[in-house]
Structure formats: structure tokens, C-alpha cells
Amino acid sequence: MNTIYKNIQGNSKAGKKLLAILIDPDKFLIENTFKFIKKVNQSIATHIFVGGSTVDEGVTDVLVSELKKHTNLPIVLFPGDITQITNKADALLFLSLLSGRNPEYLIGKHVKAISKLKASPLEVIPTGYILIESGKITAVEEVTNTKPILRKDIENIVDTAKAGQFLGMKLIYLEAGSGAIKPLTSAIIENVKSELQIPLIVGGGIKSKLQIENAYNSGADMVVIGTAFENDESFFDELKK
């Protein structure tokens, strides 16, 4: 069953925009789950992503279990490592860091994950992950020991995304990185989207409803918000249904 991917794909073809709330288990207090998820359920959010660059083993499993008690939104793992895989989620973005050249994050980690995934009920979604420079060194750079693509090098960004599609990726995820100073430009998103026939996810540095709308208008099929909520939960007030 590929129900979550088919839903994303169907909404993309229909021009219906999606919003994912990214929760980093290492930055989230379990005791705040009910209050936080109540706001998520009252917002226009369509998905919950769970993951981070560095997360202690077992923490993701506990968090997903608690989230499941309070929401019917699909919970999708956005893992930085195989220790973040839990069968209690609904799906997993099987991320290949296409912008980097560290073989561990292109294929190595994926091979190590198979022992967990081959008997797992998780829907596994092959995803090309492309990190774009954002004005600061991100946790992704530090953990993966890779460099992002310069945002001025739009042709390289587009070609990397297109290569991901040709390799069989079902999604492309353009990322400015957690805590990015500025979101990706409209030019980057527009140029990448114009070359893709698969859904495009955009995240990093988005801190306002206007920036979400700009990403949508530029071609993003799904926008991911994380740090904005970590810093200010009142942001949910802008995103009520």
C-alpha cells in the first residue's frame, strides 16, 4: 500500500497544497503533546513529520506513540539515522542526500536500515533530499559532513533534483536546513518545479504565512514548518482552518 504517497501525488496533480509540521524529538517535551497537537489539529496542517539530525535512540518511538493518541493526521518519519525508525509511524521518507557526496548518506545508511525495514509495515517513500545553503552552518552539514549547494547555483540545484527523479525518487525535498536564516527563493523553487514530474517538498527558514504562500505560489506541493513553531507556537494562530 502506498496510500500516503498516492495522497501527496494526487493533491499535487490537483493543485491542492499540503503543510507538514516537523517535530524534532530532541527539542520536544512529551508533556506538551496534548496542548501542541490540539493546535496542530485546528490548523491547516495535513501531515506531521518526526525526525532530527541527532536524536537519542528510543525517543522517536515514545514520541510517535504519544502523538498517535491525539491526532489522526499521518505521521511520517524524517529520520537523520536508523535509530529513529519506529513501526508506530505511518510512513518513512527514505532520504538520499543528493546534494552531498558522503556515500553513507547517499546509500550507506539505507543499506543498514534494511534489516529494520524489510519486515516493517511502514510505507517507505524514496525521497531525494537536497540541502541548499542558508546563511549558516546547519545541523545537517555537521552530521553528514557534506556541503550544501550554493543558492545562486540554480542550474546545479535543478539538475540535482532532475537526477533524483531519473534515479526513481518519488519526492524531491528542497531544504534550507533547520533554523535557516532565510527560506529558499522563488527562483529556486520555480526552476526546480518546472523540471519535475514528481511532487516537490520545500522546507527551512519559513517563519510566516506569507512565506508559506510564496513557496506554494512558486511551485511547492508541500511546505514543511519546524523551527517557527519551536520558537513561537502562536504561529498556529495564523494557520487556523
Image (spheres, helix red, strand yellow):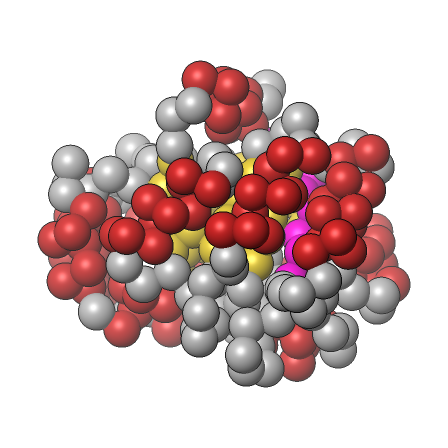
* Front residue of this view, candidates 220 and 177: 220
Q: Residue at image x 36%, y 42%? A: 19
- Percent across and percent down for residue 68 are 33, 43
- Percent across and percent down for residue 219 are 50, 38
Q: Residue at image x 55%, y 72%? A: 134
Which range of residues does the magenta coloring cover?
123-131
Residue 231 belongs to magenta span? no
- Percent across and percent down for residue 225 are 38, 56
- Examine the image and state in which quarter residue 135 appears: bottom right
- Point out the image quarter for the N terminus: top right
- Percent across and percent down for residue 148 are 69, 69
Residue 126 belongs to magenta span? yes
* Front residue of this view, candidates 223 and 186: 186
- Left or right: residue 24 versus residue 200 is left
Is residue 124 visible to the viewer in this orientation of the structure? no
- Point out the image quarter for the C terminus: top left
Of helix, strand and loop, which mostly describes the magenta segment?
strand
Q: Residue at image x 56%, y 51%? A: 187
